[in-house]
Amino acid sequence: MAERSQYYYEKTQTPWKNTNMPDEIENNFMIDRSNRTNRLKENVFPEESLDVIPNIEMPHNSHIISSMVRMQKPAQRLRFLITNMIDYIEDTDAAVDSASTLGLASNFQIIDGLRRKIISSKNPSIISECVSSVQHISKGEQGATHIVKADFIPTLLNMLRSNDMKIVECVVSTLDNLMQFVNQSRELIRKANGIEKLVEQMDINDVKFLTVVINSLHKLTYNSVDGKEQMLGCHGSEKVVQILRQYTYEKLLFAASKLLKVLSVCNINKPVLVEIGAMEALSNLMRSGSPRLVLSCLWSIRNLSDYSSNINDMQKLIKHLIELIGSDDDHTAICALGCLCNLTSGNVENKIALIEYGGVQSVCQMICERIGQEEIVEPGVAALRHVTHNNHLAQQAVDIIIQSPLLSNLSALIRGQPDKMLPIIKAIVGLTRNLSMISPKCRRSLIDLGVTNTLCEIFYRTSNGITELSQQRNSIVSIASELSFIEGVRLEDLLELTLSALQALAKDNSAKKIISYENRLLQSIVQMVMIKENSIPLHRACLGLLAEMVEYADCARILEGEGFNTRLSELIHSTNKAISTYAAIVMYVINLSKPDDYRNRLNSEIFESLQDKLANLEDDEEMISYSPNSDYYGSQTQLNPVDNKTNPSYKYKNNPNFYENRAFEQDTDESPRNVPAKERNRQRKPQPFMDVEL
């Protein structure tokens, strides 16, 4: 060490000339001199490079220069010199230490010997030194690999029970290193109950230690269903939420929010996290000054938001999400829109908050500015659909949309979408239905923009898609069948929604005229009504449009197909109010043109039922609302995790799998659809946007 110190002294004192060196060696030394040596030279001899020291302005009058001012340049020069000398020495020591660690890491016998010594020794000091050595060895890939091969993981996990905090810290750090360098170690730790043992360490009140523990749990649960379930089973989820509430250390909060983002992907964890207040804890961190913490919390909120529509007092969060819509960061804007879409689904208070805080204007503006980004358009249009339905400010929301450029873009937007963009098509069709139902002015504008023709085309494409899928299965596509979904959209739902939108437009005679030209459309609808296996919502949508069209021109004649009157007679007695009423209207109008003797031959009981229903008929929205819970935008599977080792805000545009799973809309009815119990449970909670655990 003395020789090394003497070498440093000579090197820093005489960087230009060493009289003890031969000329040839000295020339080589001058050529190989490092950048740091150059900086040392510049600080020792600043007159050779005056640019190194910042220019310090001196007063013009030299008589008033104080001693403090005179010392500024020398003091600055001395600080630079000492800093660089320390860095130089530390880098050299680090190189020596790394060489030593590499030598140990490459020797499997030494690592195995350390394991056996930890197991056999009763001396706490020896155990502590051995564990510390293992921690240093685990800092490299080669050492970590040999540690795993030596079956060291069970031994390390057993050491977590030690009363020596130094040993516990070294063990946790070692496990974290192993998972970073050796992916197989994660499964080995999970199988050895590593998650449960790490969760036990979350009670220790040390923010830096907790940060390492949380990071380790993040690695163990990422892309692992078993890991997430184990976290739930040992109450790890509750402890993560408690950490978000209790601490202010930014690194710890960021690690906890990342772990919560992973846990919130699991549908088993979601209701538990919502129940224990995860949404509230995350919302409180949304005003944090750390951009990465805010974005991480935003992802977790988005993952949980589809289970959070029943939570009260979300108005502050809604207001902040509206502010984030206009973020220059696409990642943030997408998350904010997804949260707003989910939170306004079926929640009247959240809908009103979005309208009152100016959210409708912001969403319309964002959609128009980024009309080509489906990840912006889809949740934005869905949120607008929600606020234009089932709340007392829906008319106000519609008026705002009418005044914005969005209305004129809707028709072009829906026409420009190929079949693979069915989620966007479905969202726009739903918004079109609401706008047409609420505002006659808006209805007329949409008709003039050609929306009626576009909806007819969507009907044909969708019904043809169902037919093709039926042929593939050689039978009628069942609701529970995966073949009935395209890009996450259930075709029967889209068909049902399209018919309801046409019914709303058909209140205007201009739309009736366009639809009546499409004789093939009306004939297809009649065939759907004749198929008894079709769902109640689809029958209701078909009969609703027929009831609107039956009085126009020759539509009644088109509907007089063979057996259609008999089918209507059956539907008049349906337990569903909308179906029975629409069937009564259609049957009554069809038979108005019949001779008296023909009408007299009709069953008197049917006529009595017709009269009763027509007498009680009310022109309310629910008669056209194909579902009481039509806010629900859809249910999606989680996103396939993407390995992102650098930045959670990675460039999603370059990843073709980022939005590979799409939304479909689940509509509920008083009479449940013919869906198996298992499938109903799967569809009960809608998830408009896939969950992310990046």
Image (cartoon, grey):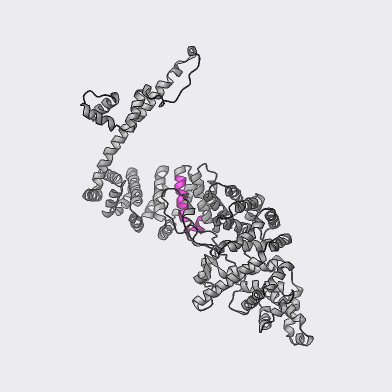
| Residue occupying the point 59% across, 63% down | 425
In this rendering, is residue 471 above or below 337? below
In this rendering, is residue 410 above or below 99? below
Is 33 situated left or right of 61 in this image? left
Image quarter for residue 625? bottom right
Image quarter for residue 479? bottom right
Question: In this view, which residue lies farthest toward the right?
Answer: 596
Write down the region rendered in magenta.
252-274
Q: Is residue 315 magenta?
A: no
- Residue 247 is situated, as x and y percent measured from the top left of the image, at 47, 44
Main secondary structure of the magenta stretch: helix
In this rendering, is residue 681 above or below 531? above
In this rendering, is residue 478 above or below 346? below
- Residue 185 is situated, as x and y percent measured from the top left of the image, at 33, 55
Q: Is residue 261 magenta?
A: yes
501 and 147: which is toward the camera:
501
Q: Is residue 85 visible?
A: no
Image quarter for residue 612? bottom right
- Residue 167 is situated, as x and y percent measured from the top left of the image, at 32, 45
| Residue occupying the point 50% across, 79% down | 474
Q: Is residue 369 visible?
A: yes
Is 3 situated left or right of 513 in this image? left
- Residue 239 is situated, as x and y percent measured from the top left of the image, at 45, 51
Q: Quadrant of the N terminus?
A: top left
62 and 338: which is toward the camera:
62
